[in-house]
Amino acid sequence: MKKYLILMAAGSGTRMNKNTPKQFIEVSGIPIIVHTYKQFKNITNLKTIIVLPENKFEYWKNYISNILKEENVKYVKGGNKRFISVKNGLKTISNKEGIVAIHDGVRPLVSETLIKTLYESANKLGNAIPYTPVINTLRKYKEESNLIVDKNNYINIQTPQVFKIKNILNSFELIKDSNYTDESSVIEKSGEKINLILGEEKNIKLTSEFDLEYFRKIII
């Protein structure tokens, strides 16, 4: 099974309120995107594509490649939406019979065990989407009213989301609407069944200053 990784690092990370996009913030002297990349290092037969911001693409490419040095990594320009960035990454894959994982560059705590499980599941089922149960009580808020909803009817979706390449490519060619925030929504829209795999609570997306400080404490 030929395996690919598309590591998403094209966003601006504005919610972190930093001048530097959050995927490039250094923790223990290493940018978050590289911490994330290292979680996949022991996956055999893997080729990596890192999608970087279109703005200052060469700058960020040089920055990351100088850290990774001899690593066999391909760098791709992103777009102004995730859909476009993912599509740009997919276009660089020549082997349409393999499996591709699409992962947020700011989820550096994903385990090797989960990664392997998702690749194996996608190879058997066509796709594998990690999730975690909703823990907190949920209320639906609308204008000045709110009401409780059954949290058992909802789950949290994570990455990496893993697909057979020919399936995800076909979905991205069929769907013209680019307003999707994750890839499972794209293949679902094209008619493919979503296969949910239990993820990990620790596999958080570093979004806020609190998340960043939490990660710093783990790494130090």
Image: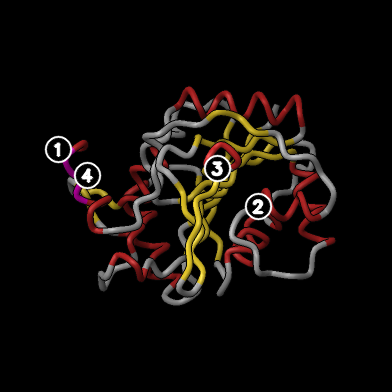
Give 24 or 121, whichever is nearer the viewer: 121
Few, some or many residues within 10 Å of mark 3 (<14, 14–19, 20+): few
Return the residue at label 2.
Answer: 183
**Could you tell me which secondary element the residue under label 1 belongs to?**
loop
Majority secondary structure of magenta residues:
helix
Q: Earlier in the sequence, mark 4 or mark 1?
A: 4
Query: Comparing marks 4 and 3, which lies closer to the viewer?
Result: 3
The residue tagged 3 is 150
The residue singled out by tag 4 in the image is: 214
Q: CA distance from mark 3 to mark 1?
A: 39 Å
Q: Secondary structure at mark 4?
A: helix
Q: CA distance from mark 4 to mark 3?
A: 30 Å
Q: Quadrant of the C terminus?
A: top left
Residue named by callout 1: 220
Q: Please give the name of the residue rendered at 72% of the width and 28% of the height, measured from the top-left corner.
A: 123
Q: Looking at the image, is 22 positioned above or below residue 204? A: below
- Looking at the picture, how far across and down is residue 2, in whole percent? 68, 32
User: Does the segment drawn in magenta span residue 89?
Assistant: no
Q: Earlier in the sequence, mark 1 or mark 2?
A: 2
Asked whether 215 falls inside the magenta stretch, the response is yes
Looking at the rendering, the stretch of residues picked out in magenta corresponds to: 213-217
Element type where label 3 sits in the image: loop
